[in-house]
Image (cartoon, rainbow, N blue to C red):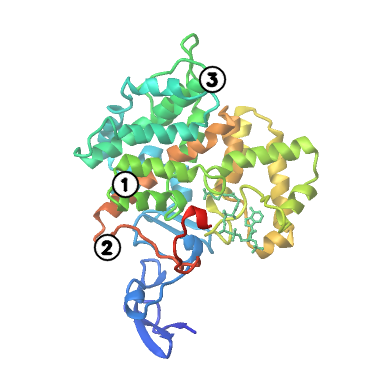
Amino acid sequence: MAVIGITDEGETEDMGVARLNLDDQEYEFPVIVGSEGEVAIQSHALRSLTGAITLDPGYGNTGSCRSAITFIDGEQGILRYRGYPIEQLAEEASFVEVCYLLIYGELPNEEELEDFRARLRRHTLIHEDMKKFFEAYPPTAHPMAILSSMISSLATFYSEEEDVDLHVVRLIAKLPTIASFSYKKSIGQPFVYPQNDLGYAENFLNMMFSVPCEDYEPPPVLARALNMLLILHADHEQNCSTSTVRMVGSSGASLFAAISAGIDALSGPLHGGANQQVIEMLEAIRDSGDDFSEFVGRAKDRNDPFRLMGFGHRVYKNFDPRASILKGAADEVLAELGVDDPLLEIARSLEDVALRDQFFVDRKLYPNVDFYSGIIYRAMGLPTNMFTVMFALGRLPGWLAHWKEMSVDPDNRINRPRQIYTGAGARDYLPLADR
Ligand code: CMC
C-alpha cells in the first residue's frame, strides 16, 4: 500500500519532497511549484527506484511538461494567455496579435505587428498543384478530414531544412485558404483566392462567401465576431489536440505532420467536434418538441451513452470563462445581424434546466466553449460541418506555440507512456491444425 505525503513547508519553490512508502521502504521525490502555485511531484525516477509506475488513464492528473504559454485555474474559471486575461484579449486584441503573443511570448509593438502581418500576407497562396487534391475528394468529405490531409501534404512541398519560423508563418497564412477552398469545393463554387489587402478575418470571410459574379464586402460585425471566436479558441494548454501535437513533435516528425495530427485529434466529438454536435443536438430537441426532460433524462441515464454536448470539462469545475463571453456575444451578434434563431432560446433554456439539475450540480458540469460558439457560427452563415474547422483555425497558434516550446525544451524526450499489462501470460504458438 503506497502513501504519498507532501511536506507541509508551504507553497514555495523549496517546497521540499514528497515521500512515498512502498513495501516498507520510503522514497523521496522532488516537489516543484509553478509560477501560479501549482504543485507537482516529479515522478520520472519512480520506476527506476521502486519498479512501479503511476497509472492515470486519460492523464487527468499527469503533468507532461512545464509550459509558460497558458494558465488555467479550473476551479476559479481563469484563463490567461502569457499572463493576459482571456476577457481582455477577446474584447480588445486582434487574432493576429494573439498569434504573435502565443508564439513569440510577448505582445508585438507596432513595427513587429506590421512585419508579422507582412510575412503572413506573403504566404497566403497555396501551391497551384495542391488545388488538384481538392478535385479527388468526394463531395461528402468532411472538411476536417480534408484540412488534415492538406496540411499533411504541405510537408511534400516544403523542405524540413527550411527555417521553422517560415513554416509557422506559412501555416497561419495558408490554413484559411485551405479551409475556405474545401468549403467552396463542397458547394461546387469556384475557389476565391486570398486578397492580401484585407485583414485576417475579412480575407477569410471573403474567400468563404464571395462569388465572382457579385460584389461582396465582409460585414464588419462578422469580422469582429470571427476575430473574437478565434481568440477564444487560440490556446488551452495541454488539451487532447495540443498534447497530440507535442507528442507527434517529440518524435522529431515534421511540424506539418504534428499539426495535421492535432487537427485529427480536434475532430473528435468529445473535443472540437462538439461544436457541430451541439447544433445537431439543439436541432434534434427543436424537432422533437421535447421540453428537455427526454434529452436531460438520457444524459443522466448511466446506461445511455448520450451526453449533453457542450457541457462538462476536464479542467473547469466552475464555469468556462470562454462560454460566459460567448453567451453574451451570441445575444449581441444575433441582434446586430438581425438573426432570430430559435436554437439560441433552446440553448439558454437547456442551460437553465441543466444548471438546476442535481446531477449536473453534483458533477460540476457547466456549458463549455462549444455550447454557444456554434450558434454564432450559424448566424454568420457558416455550415455546421465547418464549425470544427473554425476551431482549428483558432487553435493553430496554440499548437504552434506548444510545438516551438517543446522543440527547445531541454527536458523534452520522445513521449512514451508506460502501461500495466493485463493480457495472457506466456504461451506457446500452436500450428493452425492444432488449434
Ligand atoms: N453530459 C452528461 N454527463 C456528463 C457530461 C455531459 N456532457 N460530461 C460529463 N458527464 C458526467 C460523466 O458521465 C461522469 O459521470 P459519473 O461520475 O457518474 O460517471 C462525470 O460527469 C464526469 O465525467 P467524465 O467523463 O469523467 O469527465 P471527463 O473529464 O473525462 O470528460 C468531457 C470531459 C468534456 C469529455 C465530457 O464532459 C463530455 O463528454 N462533454 C460533452 C462533449 C463536449 O462538450 N466536449 C467539448 C469539451 S470543451 C472544448 C474542447 O475541449 O474541445
Frontmost of labels 1 and 2 is 2
Q: Nearer the viewer, residue 394 or 247?
A: 247
Q: Residue at x 50, y 67 (%)?
A: 422
Q: Which residue is mark 1?
A: 103
Mark 1 residue element: helix
Kind of residue at disc 2: Asp
Question: Is residue 68 found left or right of 329 in the rendered image?
Answer: left
Local packing at callout 1 (Cα closer than 10 Å; few below 14, some 14-19, many 20+) is many
Tell me if residue 111 can be seen: no
Q: Which residue is mark 3?
A: 187
Q: Is mark 2 in CB contact (under 8 Å) with mark 3? A: no
Residue 73, given in percent of the width and then of the height, sits at 48, 62
Q: Is mark 1 in CB contact (under 8 Å) with mark 2? A: no
Q: Residue at x 80, y 45 (%)?
A: 291
Mark 3 residue element: loop
- When the figure is inspected, residue 141 is found, relative to residue 314, above or below; the finding is above
First in sequence: mark 2 vs mark 3: 3
Q: Alpha-carbon distance for marks 2 and 3?
A: 47 Å
First in sequence: mark 1 vs mark 2: 1
